[in-house]
Amino acid sequence: MIEVRATDFAEAKIFIPDVFVDARGYFKETFSTDKYAAVGLHDTWLQDSVSRSKRNVIRGMHFDPRMAKLVQVLRGRIFDVIVDVRAGSPTYKRWQGFELTEDNHHQLYVPCGFAHGFLALADDVIVHYKMSALYDPKSEGVLSWRDPQVAIAWPLQGDPILSAKDAAAQGEP
């Protein structure tokens, strides 16, 4: 069974899989085509990626109009953020943040047309992404993590650690 929680955006969801805990630790299925289809997730996943980050790393805000993502934390915790970058959408440039942790097992479904990024809130963070399109740098866009029109309230303590691409990102998608 998979619990599904709504977000501020009709298309974005939080999925929480069953987690079986015992004296050894835990077991969970991180994805099953049939089980996720039964709760409304019908994307075809073409690529899986993993990132490792240290505290105060901000990755994003990245988007590819062809790509949906299913994001989960394998180690640590993050403040995960999505922003609607669909021109003409009634929720254009609105954002919502979520805490994803290795302990809460939440998975964030990021639909096509949304920018995605996160702040690492622990010293060692591993994030897993399922993606519905193959990564293509020619299709990727970057929205500034500090775009004043979006005004994400990052729970940042200290200076952010950014890639050169993310540090140089401008406001408009």
Image: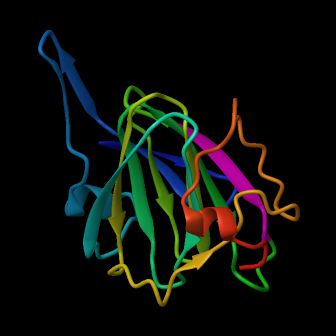
Say how many tags the image has.
0
Tell me: residue 133, above or below residue 5: below
Q: Please name whichever residue, 46 or 34, is drawn nearer the observer in this view of the structure.
A: 46
* Left or right relative to 159: residue 111: left
Report the front residue among 29 and 139: 139
Q: Is residue 158 above or below residue 170?
A: above
**Highlighted magenta segment, given as a residue range:** 91-99
Query: Would residue 10 be seen by someone viewing this image from the given angle?
Result: no
Most extreme residue toward the front is 164
The spot of residue 101 in percent (x, y) is 44, 32
Q: Quadrant of residue 3?
A: top left
Residue sitting farthest toward the top: 23
Q: Residue at x 78, y 68 (%)?
A: 93
Image position, residue 10 (x, y; %): 63, 64
Residue at the spot 29% in from the left edge and 76% down from the top edge: 44
Q: Quadrant of the N terminus?
A: top left
Q: Is residue 23 left or right of residue 107?
A: left
Which quadrant: the C terminus? bottom right
Q: Please state if 146 lies on the left or on the right of 124 as rendered.
A: right
Q: Position of residue 127 (x, y in %)?
A: 37, 47
